[in-house]
Structure formats: structure tokens, C-alpha cells
Image (cartoon, rainbow, N blue to C red):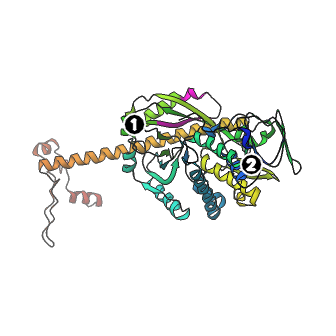
Amino acid sequence: MDEASTGTANGPGDGAMPFRSRLSFDLDVDICVIGAGLAGLTVAREAARLGASVAVLEGRHVGWNASGHQLGTVMPGFGLAIGDLIERVGLEDARELWSLSKEGADYVRAAATEELIPGIAPSDGALEVSNVDAGDALIRRLQMLNEDFETEAEGWQVDRVRDALRTGRYFHGIYYPRAFQIDGRKYVHGLAELARRAGARIFEDTPVVSIDFSGIRKRIVTPSARLRASHIVLAGNIHLGAPLRRLSETLLPVWRYAALSEPLGERLAEAITFQGSVTDSDGIDHFRIVDGDRLMWASPETTWEARPRRFGAAVQRRIATVFPQLGKVGISDVFGGAVGLTVHGMPQIGQLRKGLWVASGFGRQGLNTSAMAGQLIARSILWGDERWRLFSPFELVWAGGATGRVAGHLIGMWGRGAASAAGALARYREGARAKEVIREARLAEANRQAGTRGPPPRRRPPPGGPRPARPQPPGPSETEMEAHPTEGGPFVSSQESERIRDGSV
């Protein structure tokens, strides 16, 4: 992945501040956005395009966390499974929420063009594969996606999946032709530049020290300046800091790590022919081909921050497990970032109190949902759009603090272990069925070569004809009769036995 920022900083001659500067003077704006990630930058761009004055405060630099370290897959949906979403809010509201997620994906597609963001490198198609043989579940989900949620999706049988991914670890798949992928790091920096062009001011290295939510005009204090705004949008994920610790504690932090391989040449094309993004149904692996012959792969997760380089070997082993024909894959770069997972699995979008908004908790599917959140909040502030209320059932829930992190780590380990065991069992059953088919084919071939067709059928007497006599057991030999001189010998006829039991003898 190209680690260079594509954002450019213009001088102050056009009236806009370069977004590489720190806020060093007091400022009054309509909207203050805290956090220069995907959600915050989308709010800033859309609000500025609608005519509001906007300032973005970032404690470090644009896209420094997960927003700038992701694989760039864009597709509809949320982190919560579609069946669970329906169970929570009902079919009609679930369809509305899903439609909003598709609008978010369309927003990214419209912005991520070579004309607006050079080098963004969009490509189409995403494939979700199953670790187990789940054909019936695949059919049900396809019907729901196509009929109830108007999402274009195709079912792939096992043979087609394994023709695209030369491994026996995956079974059925769902292909999303309208999904796509982009260079995620270039997108977040390009989005910052688009927001700046629209009129938003972005200040890096400007952490928030305190916030006063009272009054019509809210007050924000930074180390070197003060800012007043009518609306504040909290878009800082788990790193909102001490002034907003209660909000950040509603998120379970999960650090996701990914690696970029060295160029693999022709051997990569022999193992993977699918050019889009691939995710498995258990959320363990997420990978795609970049630069023609390099593999970008995300897999390990922790609930604590660690140095990404530590996980290069783990990604390397995972690639070798799924695609052993690639051999030992060289790793050229490892990166990672923290995502915030909510207890209910849905993003936090809406108004906490008058003039105070939140856009956070996007989990592992942040590109489309952060774009959706940015549009909803900007339009709600300036147009009165009330669709953000669809997220009201997913309230802020405390994530458990340190205990929640430990529990989340254990649950994650258990889930991965269970998924691995289920996959191993599915592959064992598939192998056993294949061996039985081979055994039966060999037996049939042996019978053919020997000219046999199995045992001949039993002959039945013609109707009404005499039945063949049943063979009688052999009688006692003369030697046995002499050895037992008692009356009747050692063997007594059935008639005599009956007379003995009746007492007539």
C-alpha cells in the first residue's frame, strides 16, 4: 500500500488554511468536527458544500488511525448480520437502514474517481466465501438480498469459488458485482483535500482539552486556542480523549493488523484469479490483490495496542495455511489501526443533545457507513433531515472497560477457534465423501473388468407351483447312537418332544 499522503496543502492566499497546521487563533464557526477520519471529513465536506462554516480538529494527523489503514473494500451493509438487524428493528426499518448503507457506498464511488483523487485505483467486485458447506443458508440469504433488500448478489457454487481461489478451505460464496475497492489511504487524504476545497478548515496536532456543551454556542478549548460553534460533531472513535471518555467507553477497541506481501509474480495468478476483495463469512480473513502481483491480507486482531511488525509472521503463516502453493510469502509492510466495536454491532449516529452529534462505532465496515453518517448529520443540521432517527434503537451502551476488553478478546479467540473447528470438520466430511465416491467407482470398475454383476437374483417358484422341500438337518450317526444307548438316543423327534411336554409319554 502506498503510504504517501495525496493531500496537498495550499497556501493561505485563497482564504483557506492548510490542513497541516495547528489551530493557533480563536475561531467562530457553525460546525466543529472533532476527528479527521472518514466520518469527520465527510461531515466537513458535506456541510461546507451546503454553505456552513466548518472547522475540523484532529489531535494527531489526518487518517492516522484505522481510517488510513484499511483494505479499501466498499459494499453495502453493517457489522450486524442482516437477520439480527431484522429481528431488532423489523423488516421495514431494516430495509431503510440497508438503503442508507447503499447510499453510503454510492457516495464513496462518486468521490473515489481518478478525476477527484488521482491514484485511487478503483476496481469492482467483492466475494464473501463460506468456511463450511452452507448451501441452504446461501440460498436463503441470496433471496433476502435480491428480493427484500434490492441488492445485486450472485451465488457461487463450490467449484466456481475454488476455480477463482485455488484452495480447499472455502466452499460456497456470494458475489457482489456492485461492490468495489479503492486505495484506502489515498481516499482519506483525498477526502480531506475535497473538504478543504469545499471550504472546511482542517487543523492537525490540535487535541481538545475541554468542551462546554451548555448554551447555544458551544465552547471548545485546545492547547493554543479557543473555538465556538453552534454544533459539535464527535467523530473521534475510541480516541476522543479525557473530555469525552464516557462516550469512548461505549466502544470496544479492536486493533486489526494487515500486511502487504512482496511481489509474487506468476505464482500469485496460479493461486488466485479473482481480482476483487475476498472476505470469509466468519470475519477471519480479508484479502485482495494489489499492484498486479502483491497480496494485501488482514487477519490478526487484538484488544490492546501492539506494534504492527509483530504480526507480520502471523499473516505470513495464515497465507501459507490458506494457499500453501504460494510457499513462504515475503512481507514488505505491516500496518494496523484500532476500530471501535459497539455492543449491538451498529454504528452510533445521531444527536446526543441539542447541538451535540456523534458519528462513531463503525467497526470493520467503515467506508460505506462513515460516508452514510457524514451525509445524514450534515443534512440533518442544515436541512432538518430526520433519517438519523432510524439508528435510535441502537443506543449508547457501555462496553465494559478493561473487563470488556478481556471478555472481547476471549470471545474473539473462541469465535475464531469455533470457526476453525467447523471449517476443519466440513473439510473432513468433504474428504470422506470424496473417498467413498472413489471407492465405489473402483469397485464398479473391478466388477466390470471381472465380468460380474454381483450375486444372481434369487429364483422364485411359479405361482401355484410346488414349493421346494426345505433341507432337513442330518440325523444322528450310528456312532452317536451307540455312545448314548438311552431310549430315543440323544436326539428326540419333534413329535416325541411334544408328547413329552403334554405328559402323554
Lateral position of residue 201 relative to residue 408, left or right:
right
Residue 191: give x, y in percent of width and height: 63, 45
Marks 2 and 1, Cα distance to the nearest angstrom? 43 Å
Q: Are marks 2 and 1 in contact (CB under 8 Å)?
A: no
Residue drawn at x 70%, y 53% is: 49
Disc 1 designates what residue? 268
Residue 291: give x, y in percent of width and height: 46, 38
The image quadrant where one finds the C terminus is bottom left
> Element under label 1?
helix
Q: Earlier in the sequence, mark 2 or mark 1?
A: 1
Residue 449: give x, y in percent of width and height: 13, 47
Disc 2 designates what residue? 358
Rendered image quadrant of residue 252: top right
Residue drawn at x 67%, y 36% is: 405
373 vs 390, nearest the viewer: 373
Residue 187 visible? The answer is: yes
254 vs 105, nearest the viewer: 105
Residue 39: give x, y in percent of width and height: 67, 46
Residue 393 visible? The answer is: no
Crowding at dot 1, Cα within 10 Å, few <14 / some 14-19 / many 20+, comes out as some
Is 281 rendered above or below residue 261?
below
Lateral position of residue 277 relative to residue 50, left or right:
left
Mark number displayed over residue 26: none
**Identity of the amino acid at label 2?**
Val
> Element under label 2?
strand
Residue at the far left: name it: 478
Residue drawn at x 73%, y 47% is: 397
Q: Which residues are magenta?
A: 295-311
